[in-house]
Image (tube, rainbow, N blue to C red):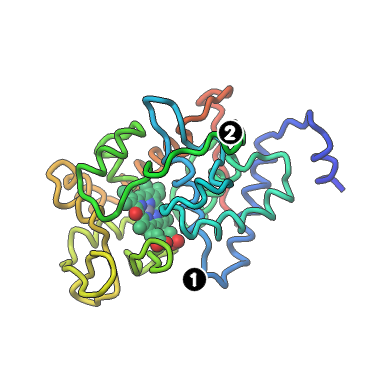
Amino acid sequence: NGDVKLKADADFKPTEADYQKVYDHIAELLAERDEYEDGSYGPVIVRLAWHASGTYDKETGTGGSNGATMRFDPEADHGANAGLKVARDFLEPVKEKFPWITHSDLWTLAGVAAIQEMQGPIVPWRPGRQDRDVSFCTPDGRLPDASQAHDHLRAIFYRMGFDDREIVALSGAHALGRCHTDRSGFDGPWTFSPTVVTNDYFQLLMKESWGWRKWDGPKQFEDKGTKTLMMLPTDMALVKDKKFKPWVEKYAKDNDVFFKDFSEVLMKLFELGVPFESKEEDRMKFKRKE
Ligand code: ZEM
Protein backbone atom coordinates (compact mmCIF):
# COMPACT_ATOMS: atom_id res chain seq x y z
CA ASN A 1 0.00 0.00 0.00
CA GLY A 2 1.47 3.30 -1.15
CA ASP A 3 0.42 5.29 1.91
CA VAL A 4 2.16 2.96 4.33
CA LYS A 5 5.27 3.15 2.23
CA LEU A 6 5.20 6.95 2.33
CA LYS A 7 4.96 6.92 6.12
CA ALA A 8 7.95 4.65 6.39
CA ASP A 9 10.04 6.65 3.96
CA ALA A 10 11.47 9.63 5.84
CA ASP A 11 13.20 10.83 2.69
CA PHE A 12 9.93 11.20 0.80
CA LYS A 13 9.88 14.62 -0.85
CA PRO A 14 6.32 15.55 -1.81
CA THR A 15 5.84 17.36 -5.11
CA GLU A 16 3.11 19.74 -6.21
CA ALA A 17 1.20 16.70 -7.54
CA ASP A 18 1.26 15.16 -4.06
CA TYR A 19 -0.17 18.32 -2.49
CA GLN A 20 -2.83 18.41 -5.22
CA LYS A 21 -3.81 14.89 -4.08
CA VAL A 22 -4.28 16.18 -0.55
CA TYR A 23 -6.36 19.05 -1.96
CA ASP A 24 -8.47 16.65 -4.03
CA HIS A 25 -9.13 14.46 -1.03
CA ILE A 26 -10.26 17.42 1.09
CA ALA A 27 -12.46 18.62 -1.79
CA GLU A 28 -14.04 15.17 -2.03
CA LEU A 29 -14.71 15.03 1.71
CA LEU A 30 -16.26 18.51 1.60
CA ALA A 31 -18.62 17.39 -1.17
CA GLU A 32 -19.47 14.05 0.47
CA ARG A 33 -20.02 15.20 4.03
CA ASP A 34 -22.87 17.61 3.28
CA GLU A 35 -24.77 16.57 6.40
CA TYR A 36 -23.16 19.41 8.37
CA GLU A 37 -24.99 22.71 8.93
CA ASP A 38 -25.85 24.68 5.78
CA GLY A 39 -24.45 21.66 3.90
CA SER A 40 -20.73 22.34 4.26
CA TYR A 41 -17.77 22.08 6.60
CA GLY A 42 -16.09 24.75 4.44
CA PRO A 43 -16.75 27.78 6.67
CA VAL A 44 -15.54 26.20 9.91
CA ILE A 45 -12.40 24.96 8.12
CA VAL A 46 -11.67 28.49 6.89
CA ARG A 47 -12.09 29.64 10.48
CA LEU A 48 -9.59 27.00 11.69
CA ALA A 49 -6.99 28.13 9.14
CA TRP A 50 -7.54 31.75 10.17
CA HIS A 51 -7.29 31.11 13.92
CA ALA A 52 -4.18 28.99 13.43
CA SER A 53 -2.56 31.91 11.55
CA GLY A 54 -4.00 34.99 13.23
CA THR A 55 -2.06 34.54 16.47
CA TYR A 56 1.01 36.01 14.77
CA ASP A 57 2.91 38.85 16.43
CA LYS A 58 5.34 40.57 14.10
CA GLU A 59 7.36 42.11 16.96
CA THR A 60 8.28 38.83 18.62
CA GLY A 61 7.82 36.58 15.58
CA THR A 62 5.70 34.26 17.70
CA GLY A 63 2.43 32.59 16.71
CA GLY A 64 1.19 32.20 13.17
CA SER A 65 0.38 29.13 11.12
CA ASN A 66 3.71 27.41 11.81
CA GLY A 67 3.28 24.91 14.62
CA ALA A 68 -0.42 23.97 14.64
CA THR A 69 -0.28 24.50 18.41
CA MET A 70 -4.09 24.59 18.59
CA ARG A 71 -3.80 20.80 18.84
CA PHE A 72 -2.88 21.35 22.50
CA ASP A 73 -5.04 22.23 25.46
CA PRO A 74 -4.07 25.71 26.44
CA GLU A 75 -4.72 27.00 22.90
CA ALA A 76 -7.58 24.64 21.98
CA ASP A 77 -9.39 25.89 25.09
CA HIS A 78 -9.02 29.61 24.32
CA GLY A 79 -12.53 31.05 24.12
CA ALA A 80 -11.94 32.26 20.56
CA ASN A 81 -11.27 28.69 19.42
CA ALA A 82 -14.55 27.23 20.71
CA GLY A 83 -16.07 24.94 18.09
CA LEU A 84 -12.91 24.47 16.02
CA LYS A 85 -12.49 20.87 17.17
CA VAL A 86 -15.15 20.10 14.57
CA ALA A 87 -12.77 21.30 11.85
CA ARG A 88 -9.67 19.64 13.33
CA ASP A 89 -11.52 16.32 13.60
CA PHE A 90 -12.78 16.63 10.02
CA LEU A 91 -9.16 16.85 8.84
CA GLU A 92 -7.73 13.98 10.93
CA PRO A 93 -8.58 11.26 8.35
CA VAL A 94 -6.76 13.37 5.74
CA LYS A 95 -3.69 13.45 7.97
CA GLU A 96 -3.93 9.66 8.34
CA LYS A 97 -4.15 9.16 4.59
CA PHE A 98 -1.22 11.52 3.93
CA PRO A 99 0.96 11.14 7.03
CA TRP A 100 3.86 13.03 5.43
CA ILE A 101 2.04 16.38 5.60
CA THR A 102 2.36 18.41 8.82
CA HIS A 103 -0.80 19.48 10.64
CA SER A 104 0.16 23.11 10.11
CA ASP A 105 0.53 22.66 6.33
CA LEU A 106 -2.67 20.60 6.27
CA TRP A 107 -4.80 23.17 8.12
CA THR A 108 -3.77 26.04 5.84
CA LEU A 109 -4.03 23.93 2.68
CA ALA A 110 -7.52 22.92 3.84
CA GLY A 111 -8.37 26.62 4.26
CA VAL A 112 -7.32 27.19 0.66
CA ALA A 113 -9.32 24.15 -0.52
CA ALA A 114 -12.42 25.28 1.37
CA ILE A 115 -12.24 28.79 -0.14
CA GLN A 116 -11.72 27.48 -3.67
CA GLU A 117 -14.40 24.77 -3.39
CA MET A 118 -16.90 27.36 -2.12
CA GLN A 119 -16.40 29.17 -5.45
CA GLY A 120 -13.87 31.62 -4.09
CA PRO A 121 -10.66 32.79 -5.78
CA ILE A 122 -7.56 30.66 -6.30
CA VAL A 123 -5.28 31.19 -3.30
CA PRO A 124 -1.59 30.44 -3.98
CA TRP A 125 -0.06 28.29 -1.23
CA ARG A 126 3.30 26.72 -0.41
CA PRO A 127 4.36 24.06 2.09
CA GLY A 128 7.06 24.43 4.73
CA ARG A 129 5.31 24.61 8.10
CA GLN A 130 6.61 22.42 10.92
CA ASP A 131 4.48 21.18 13.79
CA ARG A 132 5.72 22.41 17.16
CA ASP A 133 5.16 21.26 20.72
CA VAL A 134 2.90 22.61 23.43
CA SER A 135 5.52 25.13 24.61
CA PHE A 136 4.86 27.15 21.44
CA CYS A 137 1.17 27.76 22.28
CA THR A 138 0.38 31.47 22.11
CA PRO A 139 -1.16 33.35 25.04
CA ASP A 140 -4.93 33.87 25.01
CA GLY A 141 -6.21 37.17 23.62
CA ARG A 142 -4.37 37.42 20.31
CA LEU A 143 -7.48 36.98 18.15
CA PRO A 144 -10.03 39.76 17.72
CA ASP A 145 -12.91 40.29 20.14
CA ALA A 146 -16.15 40.78 18.21
CA SER A 147 -17.71 43.03 20.84
CA GLN A 148 -15.12 45.77 20.27
CA ALA A 149 -14.60 48.66 17.83
CA HIS A 150 -12.27 49.98 15.10
CA ASP A 151 -9.35 50.77 17.44
CA HIS A 152 -9.28 47.15 18.66
CA LEU A 153 -9.42 45.81 15.08
CA ARG A 154 -6.44 47.98 14.16
CA ALA A 155 -4.45 46.96 17.25
CA ILE A 156 -5.00 43.26 16.55
CA PHE A 157 -4.44 43.25 12.78
CA TYR A 158 -1.57 45.79 12.74
CA ARG A 159 0.17 43.43 15.20
CA MET A 160 -0.03 40.75 12.47
CA GLY A 161 1.30 43.24 9.91
CA PHE A 162 -1.91 44.07 8.01
CA ASP A 163 -3.10 47.51 6.90
CA ASP A 164 -6.62 48.99 6.70
CA ARG A 165 -7.40 47.70 3.20
CA GLU A 166 -6.26 44.21 4.20
CA ILE A 167 -8.38 44.27 7.37
CA VAL A 168 -11.47 45.02 5.27
CA ALA A 169 -10.62 42.43 2.60
CA LEU A 170 -10.06 39.74 5.25
CA SER A 171 -13.39 40.58 6.88
CA GLY A 172 -15.10 39.57 3.63
CA ALA A 173 -14.66 35.99 4.90
CA HIS A 174 -17.83 36.68 6.88
CA ALA A 175 -19.77 36.03 3.68
CA LEU A 176 -19.25 32.48 4.95
CA GLY A 177 -20.67 30.54 7.84
CA ARG A 178 -22.48 31.67 10.91
CA CYS A 179 -22.22 32.42 14.61
CA HIS A 180 -23.25 29.83 17.19
CA THR A 181 -24.62 30.60 20.65
CA ASP A 182 -22.71 27.64 22.09
CA ARG A 183 -19.37 28.80 20.59
CA SER A 184 -19.05 32.60 20.54
CA GLY A 185 -22.44 33.41 22.06
CA PHE A 186 -23.43 35.32 18.92
CA ASP A 187 -26.10 33.94 16.63
CA GLY A 188 -26.82 33.67 12.93
CA PRO A 189 -25.29 34.05 9.45
CA TRP A 190 -24.06 37.25 7.79
CA THR A 191 -25.40 36.45 4.31
CA PHE A 192 -28.11 34.43 2.58
CA SER A 193 -25.53 32.11 0.95
CA PRO A 194 -23.14 31.15 3.76
CA THR A 195 -21.38 28.42 1.79
CA VAL A 196 -20.47 30.51 -1.26
CA VAL A 197 -17.67 33.09 -1.38
CA THR A 198 -19.20 36.37 -2.61
CA ASN A 199 -18.94 40.10 -1.89
CA ASP A 200 -22.43 39.93 -0.35
CA TYR A 201 -21.06 40.77 3.09
CA PHE A 202 -19.93 44.18 1.80
CA GLN A 203 -23.12 44.75 -0.19
CA LEU A 204 -25.24 43.98 2.86
CA LEU A 205 -23.11 46.24 5.07
CA MET A 206 -23.69 49.11 2.61
CA LYS A 207 -27.30 48.57 1.55
CA GLU A 208 -29.14 46.97 4.44
CA SER A 209 -30.43 48.87 7.46
CA TRP A 210 -29.08 47.41 10.65
CA GLY A 211 -30.35 47.77 14.19
CA TRP A 212 -29.50 46.24 17.54
CA ARG A 213 -31.09 42.84 18.01
CA LYS A 214 -33.31 42.70 21.07
CA TRP A 215 -32.33 39.55 22.88
CA ASP A 216 -30.55 38.23 25.97
CA GLY A 217 -27.32 37.40 24.10
CA PRO A 218 -24.26 39.57 23.41
CA LYS A 219 -24.85 42.86 21.57
CA GLN A 220 -25.16 42.21 17.84
CA PHE A 221 -26.92 43.78 14.88
CA GLU A 222 -29.78 42.34 12.81
CA ASP A 223 -31.09 43.42 9.41
CA LYS A 224 -34.31 45.34 9.84
CA GLY A 225 -35.83 43.69 6.77
CA THR A 226 -35.79 39.94 7.38
CA LYS A 227 -34.29 39.87 10.89
CA THR A 228 -32.44 36.70 9.87
CA LEU A 229 -28.97 38.13 9.16
CA MET A 230 -26.45 39.46 11.62
CA MET A 231 -23.43 41.74 11.97
CA LEU A 232 -20.98 41.80 14.85
CA PRO A 233 -19.96 45.13 16.40
CA THR A 234 -16.56 44.69 14.69
CA ASP A 235 -18.29 44.18 11.31
CA MET A 236 -20.23 47.39 11.76
CA ALA A 237 -17.00 49.19 12.68
CA LEU A 238 -15.96 48.81 9.03
CA VAL A 239 -18.72 51.19 7.88
CA LYS A 240 -18.51 53.49 10.89
CA ASP A 241 -14.78 54.17 10.46
CA LYS A 242 -13.86 56.77 7.81
CA LYS A 243 -10.76 54.92 6.62
CA PHE A 244 -12.29 51.45 6.48
CA LYS A 245 -15.52 52.46 4.76
CA PRO A 246 -14.12 53.35 1.29
CA TRP A 247 -12.79 49.78 1.02
CA VAL A 248 -16.17 48.35 1.99
CA GLU A 249 -17.72 50.49 -0.77
CA LYS A 250 -15.15 49.37 -3.30
CA TYR A 251 -15.57 45.66 -2.55
CA ALA A 252 -19.37 46.01 -2.53
CA LYS A 253 -19.22 47.50 -6.03
CA ASP A 254 -16.64 45.25 -7.60
CA ASN A 255 -16.49 41.52 -6.87
CA ASP A 256 -13.40 41.06 -9.08
CA VAL A 257 -11.40 43.55 -7.03
CA PHE A 258 -12.58 41.83 -3.85
CA PHE A 259 -11.58 38.39 -5.14
CA LYS A 260 -8.13 39.63 -6.14
CA ASP A 261 -7.46 41.33 -2.80
CA PHE A 262 -9.06 38.50 -0.81
CA SER A 263 -6.82 35.94 -2.48
CA GLU A 264 -3.67 37.98 -1.77
CA VAL A 265 -4.53 38.71 1.81
CA LEU A 266 -5.44 35.08 2.59
CA MET A 267 -2.15 33.98 1.08
CA LYS A 268 -0.37 36.45 3.37
CA LEU A 269 -2.42 35.38 6.42
CA PHE A 270 -1.68 31.69 5.94
CA GLU A 271 2.07 32.40 5.62
CA LEU A 272 2.43 34.46 8.82
CA GLY A 273 5.33 33.32 10.97
CA VAL A 274 6.54 30.57 8.64
CA PRO A 275 10.31 30.32 8.07
CA PHE A 276 10.02 29.11 4.46
CA GLU A 277 12.99 27.59 2.71
CA SER A 278 11.08 27.82 -0.56
CA LYS A 279 10.75 30.99 -2.62
CA GLU A 280 7.66 33.03 -3.40
CA GLU A 281 7.69 31.73 -6.97
CA ASP A 282 7.41 28.19 -5.61
CA ARG A 283 3.82 28.85 -4.55
CA MET A 284 1.33 26.32 -5.90
CA LYS A 285 -2.07 26.99 -7.42
CA PHE A 286 -4.40 24.08 -6.83
CA LYS A 287 -6.94 23.01 -9.40
CA ARG A 288 -10.54 22.96 -8.21
CA LYS A 289 -12.42 19.66 -8.05
CA GLU A 290 -14.19 18.97 -11.37
ZN1 ZEM B 1 -14.60 35.44 11.95
N1 ZEM B 1 -15.90 35.08 13.43
N2 ZEM B 1 -13.89 37.10 12.92
N3 ZEM B 1 -13.17 35.74 10.51
N4 ZEM B 1 -15.20 33.80 11.00
C1 ZEM B 1 -16.83 34.07 13.45
C2 ZEM B 1 -17.06 33.14 12.45
C3 ZEM B 1 -16.32 33.03 11.31
C4 ZEM B 1 -14.38 37.61 14.10
C5 ZEM B 1 -15.24 36.93 15.00
O1 ZEM B 1 -15.27 37.31 16.29
C6 ZEM B 1 -16.03 35.80 14.59
C7 ZEM B 1 -12.26 36.76 10.43
C8 ZEM B 1 -12.26 37.88 11.23
C9 ZEM B 1 -13.03 38.02 12.39
C10 ZEM B 1 -14.72 33.30 9.81
C11 ZEM B 1 -13.57 33.74 9.15
C12 ZEM B 1 -12.85 34.86 9.49
C13 ZEM B 1 -17.57 34.13 14.66
C14 ZEM B 1 -18.66 33.15 15.07
C15 ZEM B 1 -17.09 35.21 15.37
C16 ZEM B 1 -17.62 35.68 16.72
C17 ZEM B 1 -18.03 31.92 15.73
C18 ZEM B 1 -19.08 30.92 16.13
O2 ZEM B 1 -19.90 31.24 17.01
O3 ZEM B 1 -19.08 29.80 15.57
C19 ZEM B 1 -13.82 38.90 14.33
C20 ZEM B 1 -14.06 39.83 15.52
C21 ZEM B 1 -13.01 39.18 13.28
C22 ZEM B 1 -12.27 40.44 13.06
C23 ZEM B 1 -12.28 41.08 11.90
C24 ZEM B 1 -11.31 36.51 9.38
C25 ZEM B 1 -10.12 37.40 9.05
C26 ZEM B 1 -11.68 35.31 8.80
C27 ZEM B 1 -11.05 34.55 7.70
C28 ZEM B 1 -10.17 35.05 6.84
C29 ZEM B 1 -15.58 32.25 9.34
C30 ZEM B 1 -15.43 31.51 8.02
C31 ZEM B 1 -16.58 32.07 10.28
C32 ZEM B 1 -17.76 31.10 10.24
C33 ZEM B 1 -17.43 29.83 11.00
C34 ZEM B 1 -18.55 28.84 11.01
O4 ZEM B 1 -18.46 27.91 11.81
O5 ZEM B 1 -19.51 28.96 10.26
Residue 173 appears in the figure: no
- The answer to whether mark 1 and mark 2 are in CB contact below 8 A is no
Residue 257 image point, x, y percent: 31, 44
Q: Amino acid at mark 2?
A: Arg
Residue 240 image point, x, y percent: 14, 51
Whether residue 56 sits left or right of residue 131 in the image: it is: left
Q: Is mark 2 within 8 Å of ligand 1?
A: no
**Residue at the spot 84% in from the left edge and 45% down from the top edge:** 4
Residue 83 appears in the figure: yes
Q: Secondary structure at mark 1?
A: helix
Whether residue 61 sits left or right of residue 185 in the image: it is: right
Task: Choose top left, top right, bottom left or bottom right for residue 34.
Answer: bottom right
Quadrant assignment for the C terminus? bottom right
**Residue at the spot 31% in from the left edge and 39% down from the top edge:** 156
- Say the numbered circle drawn on residue 129: 2
Which residue lies under the disc numbered 1?
37
Whether residue 217 sits left or right of residue 80 in the image: it is: left
For label 1, the crowd category at 10 Å Cα-Cα, with few meaning under 14, some 14 to 19 and many 20 or more, is few
Whichever of callouts 1 and 2 sits on the residue coming sooner in the sequence is: 1
Q: Is mark 1 within 8 Å of ligand 1?
A: yes
Q: Amino acid at mark 1?
A: Glu
